[in-house]
Image (spheres, rainbow, N blue to C red):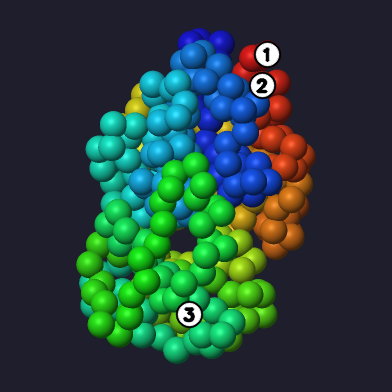
């Protein structure tokens, strides 16, 4: 343990750890198992929901892992115990769900408890959840509820579709929420002070090491704080250009389609 360069390996999933087919590649799975066997904690920090991530981790032979999900609104251990949560208050969540948008260009989603709700059928979204089988339920949000809301998110056909909505959401709810892009087409609203970094800090408070003993990988604007606060933050070559602009001095690695995170991890932790 004493000669480990980092105590924890932390990675975003989509565009980072997952390959071009939105799954954990065999090379990556093998790498994480080998890193874990060295005594390193594996932490997945993602915008995805808990059940979705747990299904993927349970396919790996790893004993010490944790999940920071919904951009930091929840933290679970590998056994499924909820370590930390920060939900949008019920009435506020419902209010955000009623916001107007162009339904031809944007779809509305929420993660609430263990469920994913959406306002319309979007079969193409299922390709992102092939490994877990996690899927949405179509609901009428005007008749829905705001309980246990980890996040409300809007998926647009383009970034331009989301910009006016982003402006309006920030004007109305900016003082009570965290509003961030997880991808250039996905605008996400969480409770105030929710971030992967905040959740990671809560998680390591239960451990015998600090944030500066973690190495982390990311590709989106929802990774900024996490990459800044860990001991070493790496930016994907395929990252959102806005992330590269915000972190110009951070080391950039290869592409998620080439499983670059696994290659980097093997070099850092000396596993082959």
Which x, y percent locates residue 37? 49, 14
Residue 25, above or below 37: below
Q: Which residue is mark 2?
A: 266
Would residue 252 appear left or right of 158 to someone viewing this image? right
Would residue 46 appear left or right of 64 to someone viewing this image? right
- Image quarter of residue 41: top left
Would residue 237 appear left or right of 225 to someone viewing this image? right
Please give the name of the residue rendered at 28% of the width and 31% of the height, measured from the top-left corner: 79
- Whole-Å distance between the Cαs marked 2 and 1? 6 Å
Task: Give the numbered dot on residue 272.
Answer: 1
In the displayed orientation, state which residue is furthest to the top: 2
- Whole-Å distance between the Cαs marked 2 and 3? 41 Å
Q: Which residue is mark 3?
A: 170
Indicate which label's residue lies in the foreground, 3 or 1. Answer: 1
- For the question of whether residue 35 can be seen, the reply is no
**Badge 3: few (under 14), some or many (20 or more) residues near its Cα, within 10 Å?**
some
Residue 133, above or below 144: above
């Amino acid at each position: 343990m004493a000669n480990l360069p980092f105590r924890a390996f932390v990675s975003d999933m989509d565009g980072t750890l997952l390959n071009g087919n939105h799954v954990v590649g065999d090379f990556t799975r093998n790498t994480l198992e080998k890193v874990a066997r060295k005594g390193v904690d594996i932490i997945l920090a993602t915008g995805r929901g808990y059940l979705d991530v747990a299904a993927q981790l349970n396919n790996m032979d790893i004993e010490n892992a944790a999940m920071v999900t919904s951009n930091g609104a929840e933290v679970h251990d590998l056994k499924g115990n909820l370590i930390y949560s920060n939900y949008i208050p019920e009435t506020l969540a419902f209010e955000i769900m009623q916001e107007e948008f162009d339904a031809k260009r944007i779809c509305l989603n929420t993660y609430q408890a263990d469920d994913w709700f959406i306002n319309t059928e979007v079969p193409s979204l299922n390709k992102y959840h092939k490994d877990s089988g996690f899927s949405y339920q179509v609901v009428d949000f005007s008749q829905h509820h705001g309980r246990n809301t980890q996040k409300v998110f809007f998926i647009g056909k383009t970034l331009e579709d989301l910009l006016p909505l982003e402006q309006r959401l920030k004007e109305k709810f900016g003082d009570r929420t965290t509003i961030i892009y997880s991808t250039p087409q996905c605008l996400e609203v969480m409770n105030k002070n929710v971030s992967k970094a905040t959740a990671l800090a809560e998680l390591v408070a239960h451990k015998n090491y600090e944030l500066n003993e973690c190495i982390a990988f990311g590709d989106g604007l929802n990774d900024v704080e996490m990459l800044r606060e860990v001991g070493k933050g790496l930016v994907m070559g395929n990252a959102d250009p806005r992330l590269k602009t915000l972190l110009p001095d951070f080391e950039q690695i290869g592409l998620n389609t080439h499983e670059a995170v696994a290659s980097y991890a093997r070099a850092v932790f000396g596993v082959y």
